[in-house]
Amino acid sequence: MKRSSVKELLHSDKFLQEVHVKGWVRTFRSNRFIALNDGSTINNIQCVVDFENTEEELLKRITTSAAVSITGTLTESQGKGQSVEITVTKLEILGDSNPDEYPIQPKKHSLEFLRENAHLRIRTNTFSAVMRVRSALSFGVHKYFQENGFNYVNTPIITGSDAEGAGEMFHVSNFDTNKAPLNEAGEIDYTQDFFGKETNLTVSGQLEAETYAMALGKVYTFGPTFRAENSNTTRHLAEFWMIEPEVAFNDLDANMDLSEDFIKSVLGYVLENCKDDLAFLDNRLTQEEKTKPQAERSEMGLLEKLNFVANNNFKRVSYTEAFDILRNSKPNKKKKFQFPITEWGVDLQSEHERYLVEKHFKCPVILFDYPAKIKAFYMRLNDDGKTVRAMDVLFPGIGEMVGGSQREERLDVLKAKMADLNIDEEELWWYLDTRKFGTAVHSGFGLGFERLVLFTTGMSNIRDVIPFPRTPQNAEF
Ligand code: 4AD
Ligand code: MG
């Protein structure tokens, strides 16, 4: 008999018909009521066992997390809270589970405890909701770009260049670490390594994506990126997924338009397609907020916040305007910022970004025209000679969601910038070629996918929105 999903059955009105379903027992009450979940939806289907006519041995094996196969009749439920249930006619245990050893009990566990059981936490309502929303978000990402004429480009994961110039890279080598050959200068001789040169895991697919934008026009990447920065925060992962569109002939304004339209569209997609999971997460966040002191509580619920962002314009502000706002702000004057805002040119910290977004503008903000000194080498220099056409999209509760820029398309300016920063022209010869052969204005950005998932699900730690987080001192599973 054809197997249905729990989701299909919960929406079905084929009453009194025989149905077949497989899943895991969430709870088993009164030797009678199984709450069955198969991952297709946050909701369980109630399966009612005729315990008087079922062997006791079998009843004992119906325990939380056991895998079962059920055949029965779909009926209108008598109990409140569900519209349909299954009157079980045949029950088979597919996989037993020992309830005394199973770590995920039907009670509230701390997120820390669940992180230590990342292989099982997906069996909870919270994590299954988060990961279904994550899946829908990634589909929404592809949908947006595919419907808007972008080509999906798979840029390399192993590279020889440092796109961000920050030096926060994981080395890739197949040397035996204890016996790496040395050159005459006594340094590790990478010419003998697998690739014949020093290589690392990519921090961004941008430089390669730029070369593709110079032929395909509109491209995007969506893949894993790696950063060996020792940031133990709720916003940083050592392995995260980044979405990087790159568009020929787009200037910074068009780039800002694209980022805003893209984010709104993707949020709109999940609002439309993840109603049950978002309703659950909305409620979860409301409960969570109640445990916080009044002053720290968010003013908006999750759904309200998502709808607000999807339907309102982002505020666009130059770095210089933002700098003035921050310098004159109460927390700065009262020395409440850990990093005081004193001189023009300082890098903004997450406390400043969040002040702008959460306290001052109360909406997502796009900051642009940053000081050249604090941004990467490839950003286009403005005529003032001291700012670059950079943009960061800042989000409430998150800080930086997107970093992007109009790229420096002028060969001489780019070369001068690289010389300034001691970036070897020979290493990036292929990147410079794009500026020699038909160079053009172009722009792009990178959106940290987990930060988007964090915002969308209302979770508060980035480790809880990726299946198996990689952070300093942690690569279990
Ligand atoms: O601002 P970033 O470093 O920009 C780039 O890498 C550019 N090459 C992107 C481009 O223009 N194509 O990173 C982009 C985004 C950040 O805004 C943030 O959302 C996310 O990537 N991000 C991280 N997310 C999780 N963990 C980390 N360690 C992250 N570092 C950056
Ligand atoms: Mg950035």
Image: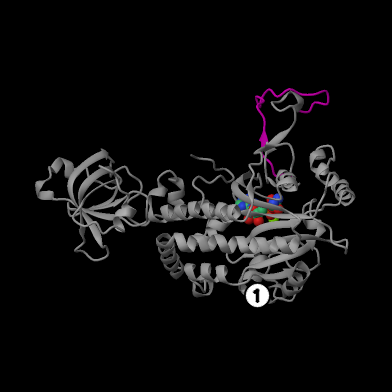
Please name the predominant secondary structure of the magenta segment in the image.
Answer: loop
Residue 403: horizontal and vertical position, in percent?
A: 69, 57
Residue 220: horizontal and vertical position, in percent?
A: 65, 49
The residue positioned 20% from the left and 43% from the top of the image is 91
Residue 199: horizontal and vertical position, in percent?
A: 71, 34
Q: As rendered, which of 124 and 262 lies closer to the eye? A: 262
Q: Residue tagged by mark 1? A: 360
Q: As rendered, which of 220 and 129 lies closer to the eye? A: 220
Q: Does residue 67 sit above or below 127 in this rendering?
A: above
The residue positioned 37% from the left and 51% from the top of the image is 40
Residue 284: horizontal and vertical position, in percent?
A: 42, 64
State which region is magenta: 167-188
* Disc 1 Cβ-to-ligand 1 distance below 8 Å: no
The answer to whether residue 155 shows anywhere in this view is yes
- Quarter of the view holding residue 278: bottom left
Q: As rendered, which of 130 and 135 lies closer to the eye? A: 135
What is the residue that sits farthest to the left in this orientation?
Answer: 52
The answer to whether residue 292 shows anywhere in this view is no
Colour pattern: one colour
117 in the magenta segment: no
The residue positioned 26% from the left and 63% from the top of the image is 83
The residue positioned 13% from the left and 49% from the top of the image is 51
Position of 298 compared to 242: left or right?
Answer: left
172 in the magenta segment: yes
Callout 1: 10 Å neighbours few (<14), some, many (20+)? few
Position of 21 compared to 263: left or right?
Answer: left
Position of 282 compared to 220: left or right?
Answer: left
Position of 149 compared to 284: left or right?
Answer: right
Q: Does residue 3 sit above or below 369 in this rendering?
A: above
Amino acid type assigned to the residue bearing label 1 in the image: His
- Quarter of the view holding residue 97: top left
